[in-house]
Amino acid sequence: MKLLSKVAAIGALTLIAACSNNDPSALGGGAGGGGALVPGSPSDPRSPAYFQQTVGDRVLFAVDQSTLSPQAQTILQGQADWLLANPDFVANIEGHADEQGTREYNLALGARRANAAREYLISRGVAGNRLTTVSYGKERPIEICSTEECYSKNRRAVTVLTGSTLG
Amino acid sequence: MMKLLTSLLVGLTILSAPVYAQSGPLRLEIDEGIIEPMPFAVPSFVPDGPSAAQYAQDISRVIVSDLTGTGLFREISSDAFISRVSSFDAPVQFADWKAINAQALVTGAVNVSGKRLTVRFRVWDVFSGQELGNGLQFAGTTDGWRRMAHKVADQVYTRITGEGAYFDSRVAFVSESGPKDQRRKRLAIMDYDGANVQYLTDSAAIVLAPRFSPTGDRLLYTSYETGQPRIYLLDVGRVKRQELPTQEGTMSFSPRFSPDGRSIVYSLTQGGNTDLWKMDLASGQSVRLTNTPAIETAPSYSPDGSRIVFESDRSGTPQLYIMPATGGEATRISFGQGRYGTPVWSPRGDLIAFTKQNKGRFHIGVMRTDGSEERLLTASFLDEGPTWSPNGRVIMFTRETQGASGRSTLYSVDISGRNLRPVRTPDGGSDPSWGPLQN
């Protein structure tokens, strides 16, 4: 938390995330909202919570695909900008698949997705040594219904800030 | 005596009358049509003292359960019995067993002396009034009473069907509990029928797909305990394990032993691309077997170790391929509609079991090694991950039900497609690996 220096309140108020995705595996979170600038809260543009909720920590994929949609590229561009502005952070990109497909194939497919996101961030200037990847295949769905509505959210690559290069 | 031992004709190739013969020698034939299960009787084995009474009863029940579990035999309830068997050596009253239409009769006796348990048994062809094979006895400790029951049942099964034995075997699997988005997975091992479950890991890290060594002494499995999927080798007897060497920044998974148990073939993912590698277990050295931008995974050796069947999406969708065990050019063998995965070579060498996904359904199927004669044995929302019984007659696999309350269960099915049944485990189960027949 010592890394999360205070930021100007200007702008923060307008950037409060509408999205409230609480991924317990990610850092940050904290007591968001209210509009008061609390370091580490989603209103702090340098906080992991801000990265997760406002920049957007995940991109979604079509069935059995690992190519990045224009929308995914926009989100990743935002991630790259954030990572370049916050050079103390490193990230682990988690690739996931929906439950359609065998366990083994989905592990490999999740790896493709995580790598596609990583390559994009590198192409936008983020140093490769700040970005690791892992695939969970279909082992860690966030939505558990068995329809496309859930599947589409499970086919994802999530950029998880794992801490700081400074420790 | 051998004339009585008609082979259990494997349904794939032999077409014959779908019933056992009413007259003549005891025989059991199977084809792809309806089978009439053979009626048999197992009067409770005779205990030779009070300390053997419970064992005698329990062993008899396990023998019956093994035989009826094949779908090939039908138990005649003891309520129908005319004869009582009160002495193992007394002459069998065949007329009494004929009268209730028992085709086969198994008689036995159990002796307990301290911790030592001895089981004697005989198998009878009721209609010819002859013994099928010779009487045998198995001895062991009282703790191992179930194994002795399985050994007796294996003898009965092989003598009547001519098939190889498989009841005295174990299955490694992943025990699953909790909802889909918080699934807890533990490595476990059990008897083939779901008894004697023993847990080998806790649920702190995701564990996947245990694979038995050819002799059943070791298990390969994949665990996320370092954060990345990596392959571990576990000594089953000592529950001692080691992490296999790997390269930094890679994932390794989907391992399987070579038939000689000295090396493994597995998937290694680098930079998002998954290829097949082979590792010599003694040296820890790995060599690459495939080198394509496609996903290559789920490798399985032929029983002679000369070839590897695997899954690749190099054609655009996952399909099955066979290549030499040293790598090199691969031949595609699956050409049906849909997506194919997790091929496993049968212990007999003639068939490959696989997972197929088509039109939103999953199937377990078998095909010949050239891809011909594909037959789908199951259909459900999600079936995957077949494993062969030691005799190549039965396939166990994972079935997952759909929706928020979806749950994984182990199932088994005969390679004829008959006798689909769940394998009872304390919690959910997935990723079975059927070990060899025990010594």
Image (tube, coloured by chain):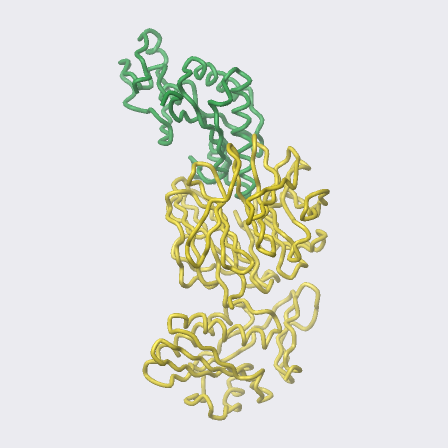
Chain colours: A green, B yellow
Front residue (pair B281, B386): B281
Instruction: Judge from the rendering whether residue B293 lies leftward or rightward of residue B122; answer left or right.
Output: right
Residue A7, x across and y down, in percent: 32, 10
Residue at 41 percent across and 89 percent down: it is B86
| Quadrant the N terminus of chain B occupies | bottom right
Residue B367, x across and y down, in percent: 67, 54
Front residue (pair A62, B46): B46
Residue at 42 percent across and 41 percent down: it is B225
Q: Is residue B268 visible?
A: yes
**The quarter of the displayed image where residue B55 is located:** bottom left
Residue A75, x across and y down, in percent: 48, 19
Front residue (pair B21, B351): B351
**The quarter of the displayed image where residue B184 is located:** top left
Task: State the residue lying farthest toward the front.
Answer: B283
Instruction: Judge from the rendering whether residue A120 lies leftward or rightward of residue B375; answer left or right.
Output: left
Front residue (pair B104, B342): B342
Circle count: 0
Residue A43, x across and y down, in percent: 32, 16
Residue at 50 percent across and 68 percent down: it is B168
Q: Is residue B399 visible?
A: no
Residue at 65 percent across and 49 percent down: it is B309
Q: Is residue B230 above or below residue A126?
A: below
Q: Is residue B365 above or below residue B52?
A: above
